[in-house]
Structures are given as C-alpha cells and as structure tokens.
C-alpha cells in the first residue's frame, strides 16, 4: 500500500554568494511542509540563508554515463516531430567533481526550453567551464523557496548559530589534560568547558 | 568470481562489470542512473537501510534520559544529539531511496521486526553515566565505521556519511568529556563511570560485526569499494584509540587479556562472546522487544499528525483550484 507522502529534493544555500546545492530529500504533503521539514533535517547547524524544494518527479536527471549512452539524443530526435510546446524556464544544476563532499549537484543557472531534454542540451552548450558528471534540470515554476525577507531568514536559520554546544570545537580540549586529572575530588557537572 | 554474484541475462554483463569496476578503481563515484550490478544494489540497500534503522532506534536508549539529565546544559546537549540521530536516519533513508526502494517499504520492514538494526541498541541504559559512555564508545565505534564509509564508491551513501561524520564528532566528544569528568570525580561518580564502561565495552567491540573470516559479505563489499576496510581492521582502530585513553583516565577495561603489542603497535583483545552477539541479533537481547514496541507505539500515536497534514495539504490544493 503506497501511503507515503511525495519525495522532495532539498537545495540549501550556505551564504548569499554560494549556489544552492542538493543536500538530500524529505517526504512531505505540500511545499510548505517540505520546507519546514527540510529546515529541521538539513539546517540544524550553520550555515544556511535559503532553501529550495522541488518534487522528485519534477526533476530530470542524467549522469555522464547515461548521456554517453546517447539514448537521449534519439529521444530528442523523436520529439522533434511532435508539436512544440511553448518554452519555459528551467533551473540547471550540475556536479563536476568526484571529491569527498556532503552535497551533490550545484545550481549553475537557468535556460529557456520546450522540453527537459532540450533544457539539458542547452545546459550542455551554456555551462561549459567544467566537465559535468551529472545534470539536473527542474522547471522553475516547480521550485519552492523559503521566504527571502531578512526576518524570516533570521527566524529560520539563526537559532542554529547560537547552539555552539553542537559544534565539536566546543569540546576541543577534551582529552588533552588527562594526566593532570586529580582523583578523589568531587566535581560539579558544569565545571568542565 | 562472476558466477558467485550471478550473471544476469544481459549479454554485455561482463563488459559492463569490467567498466564498472574500472570506474571504482579510478576513484569515481557511482551515481543513481549509472549502471551497477544487481548485487551492488542489493548489498547497498541492505547496508544503508540497516544503518538508517540503527539511527532511528538509536534515539530510544538515550531519549529515555532526556527528562533526567542532571543539568540544563547536559539536557540541551542530549536533546541536540537525539535530534541529530533522527536527522541521520533521514539522510540514510534518502540514500537508500536512490537505489529504488521506497521509504515506506523500509519503515514497514522495521516496524514488522523483519529488518535488522545495530544490536548495540538492544542493551538498556541503566544510569546517567551510560549516556556519556554511549557517546564515547558507541558513537566512537560508529565514527570509525562511518569515516571509512565516507569513502564509499556509491555517491549518495558517501555524501550522507560525510554529513553524518561532521555532526557525529560532537556526539563522541561530549560523551568523552562527560566520562573523563566523572572519572576524576567522587568515588560514587567514578564507580558509575566504571560500571558503564564495563557494560558497554564488549557490545561496542561487537558493533563492527563478525570477524573477517566469519563475514561472508566483506570480500565483495571491499572489491566494489562499498567498504574500504574490513570489520577487524575498523575494530582494531577503535581499540587502539580508546583503550589507552580509558586506561589513562584511571578506569579499567573488562578484558583480562587486553594488552599492548609492541611489535604491531596494536592493543590486542581477548575472545569476543559471539554467542551473545548472535542471540541479540536474533531478537533475544535485553531490550529487543521494548525497542520495537516503542517504535510501533510512536508510529501509531503519530498517525493523527500524518492525517492532519494530509488533510491540510488536500484542502490547500482544493482552495488553489
């Protein structure tokens, strides 16, 4: 029995000048619910200034291997004979490195296209500064974002900054003074750090 | 070699497998949509879903102590830690979903008792000192494993692990700090810390799983870069780090055979009671029944929240139309 809520991919922006990056997914009943859950799951710690969510079924994804298999070009060819729909805006995301990372594709820009396949083809000729290992394109009107007003950003993302006890640096000196520990002395639990 | 994993009907299987293994050899990540042997997919679903269940069930032993934390600071730390475990479960369910299994299927497997999770969470938390000891030893053992898995050849699992490791280090350090504090405290505090170490040491060593010679999955997992170290290697790393620190803190370890081996630089341990391990895995541990019941109860008692959110979403859609 399939009763689970739809899956939403989550994109997090760490600072205003960084791209939104795919961090994982959540299940939610609607966009608002998806954003709230995304905040709880992916922004328990700094940094975040904005989040986007899009339903997994609205995301078109290709890996380098899939593109190489060229089935895509055939599909694009076949589609050329069907009546064209009017162009719409797609957001384009790309992965360029196999390096250790906690994020997948980065937002690189937008293209105007009639189909997702056309959007991919345009992305490949537009964003050429690095080799793409994976592409995602998402219709722009299918992406929902957190409210960009400063008050909302503050109330959504600032609390994570104050909870310094969640950071390992808070305990940086643990273990460095074991030899100095004196036995037999009662201690208050709050004495350390 | 191939026959062992089953050669599917695909006539190009051997060539595809060779290309796949060459990619792993080059250090490339395998991503959703890329070709992979069915056995690779099956092993990953098995490992990642078990890992996700462990994070979710892992909230229970510690969550039981949130209301009894001795200070506000300790309570905030414990709340944050338990909340993290919930988040880690979410990251991992996401990674497993990219392989084609639904979250609902995984949750049903957990609630029905069909799915496995780490046997460590079927032991009870008897005193407050257990909370510090779990952070230091259980999270310490988990981090050794997860640091290794962050190198995993499957992209989504690797990324979940990198994110988890960054957060889990806080769990380890807060636990270590707490135990070290009690180790230099009153006789009663020291006794509590020692008692907790005595009870958690062996289960922590069992967390890495059976010895390599008894671990049939290890060969293929290492071959395909899912794991980059064996169970015994990870266990040795854990002991080498933790044994000297615990002893240096003036505490003892419940292993009369434990000794430092000059030749290898390793701390050698005595025999592990695998009968106990398999009993707990099979469902006969001290807390198996309670853990499962707690999960089922939480799921049932949360039903009205799910229904309310569903109703709200339906109404919003109706209004929009």
Image (spheres, rainbow, N blue to C red):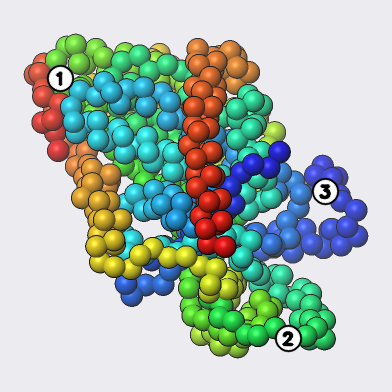
Q: Quadrant of the C terminus of chain B?
A: bottom right
Q: At which x and y percent is residue B82?
A: 37, 34
Q: What is the secondary structure assignment of the residue under circle 1?
A: loop
**Camera-nearest label, 3 or 2:** 2
Q: At which x and y percent is residue B247?
A: 28, 24
Front residue of B273 and A133: A133
Q: Residue at x 46, y 51 (%)?
A: A33
**Camera-nearest label, 1 or 2:** 2
In this rendering, does residue B242 appear at all? no
Residue occupying the far bottom of the picture:
A125
From mark 1 to mark 2, how far is it between C-alphas?
77 Å
Identify residue for label 1: B185
For the residues bearing labels 1 and 3, Cβ distance under 8 angstroms: no
Residue B139 appears left or right of B173: right
Q: Residue at x 23, y 46 (%)?
A: A163
Q: At which x and y percent is residue A187?
A: 11, 22
Q: Residue at x 82, y 63 (%)?
A: B15
Mark 3 Cα-neighbour bin, 10 Å: few <14, some 14–19, many ≥20 = few
Front residue of B70 and A10: A10
Residue occupying the far left of the picture:
A185
């Amino acid at each position: 029995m399939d009763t689970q809520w739809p899956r939403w991919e989550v994109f997090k922006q760490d600072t205003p000048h960084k791209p939104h990056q795919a961090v994982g997914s959540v299940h939610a009943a609607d966009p608002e619910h998806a954003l709230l859950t995304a905040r709880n799951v992916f922004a328990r710690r700094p940094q975040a200034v904005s989040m986007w969510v899009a339903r997994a079924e609205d995301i078109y994804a290709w890996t380098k291997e899939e593109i190489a298999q060229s089935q895509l070009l055939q599909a694009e060819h076949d589609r050329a004979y069907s009546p064209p729909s009017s162009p719409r805006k797609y957001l384009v995301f790309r992965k360029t490195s196999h390096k250790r990372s906690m994020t997948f594709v980065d937002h690189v820009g937008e293209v105007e296209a009639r189909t997702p396949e056309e959007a991919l083809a345009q992305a490949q000729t537009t964003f050429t500064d690095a080799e793409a290992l994976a592409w995602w394109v998402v219709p722009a009107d299918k992406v929902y974002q957190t409210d960009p007003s400063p008050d909302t950003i503050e109330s959504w993302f600032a609390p994570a900054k104050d909870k310094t006890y969640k950071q390992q640096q808070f305990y940086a000196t643990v273990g460095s003074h074991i030899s100095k520990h004196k036995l037999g002395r009662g201690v208050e639990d709050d004495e350390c750090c | 070699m191939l026959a062992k994993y089953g050669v599917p009907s695909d006539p190009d299987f051997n060539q595809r497998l060779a290309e796949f293994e060459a990619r792993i050899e080059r250090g490339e990540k395998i991503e959703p949509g890329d070709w992979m042997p069915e056995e690779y997919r099956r092993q990953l679903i098995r490992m990642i879903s078990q890992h996700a269940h462990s994070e979710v069930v892992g909230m229970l032993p510690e969550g039981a102590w949130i209301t009894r934390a001795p200070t506000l600071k300790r309570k905030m730390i414990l709340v944050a830690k338990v909340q993290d475990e919930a988040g880690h479960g979410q990251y991992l369910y996401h990674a497993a979903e990219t392989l084609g299994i639904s979250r609902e299927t995984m949750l049903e497997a957990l609630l029905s008792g069909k799915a496995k999770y780490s046997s460590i969470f079927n032991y009870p938390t008897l005193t407050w000192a257990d909370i510090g000891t779990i952070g230091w030893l259980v999270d310490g053992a988990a981090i050794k494993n997860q640091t290794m898995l962050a190198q995993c050849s499957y992209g989504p699992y690797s990324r979940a692990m990198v994110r988890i490791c960054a957060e889990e280090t806080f769990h380890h350090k807060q636990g270590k700090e707490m135990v070290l504090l009690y180790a230099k405290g009153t006789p009663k505090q020291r006794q509590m810390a020692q008692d907790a170490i005595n009870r958690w040491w062996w289960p922590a060593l069992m967390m890495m799983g059976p010895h390599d010679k008894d671990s049939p999955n290890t060969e293929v997992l290492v071959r395909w870069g899912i794991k980059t170290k064996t169970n015994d290697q990870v266990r040795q790393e854990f002991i080498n780090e933790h044994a000297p620190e615990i002893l240096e803190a003036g505490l003892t370890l419940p292993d009369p055979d434990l000794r430092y081996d000059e030749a290898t630089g390793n701390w050698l341990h005595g025999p592990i009671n695998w009968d106990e391990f398999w009993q707990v895995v099979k469902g006969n541990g001290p807390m198996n029944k309670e853990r499962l019941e707690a999960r089922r109860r939480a799921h049932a008692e949360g039903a009205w929240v799910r229904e309310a959110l569903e109703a709200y979403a339906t109404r919003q859609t109706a209004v929009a139309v």
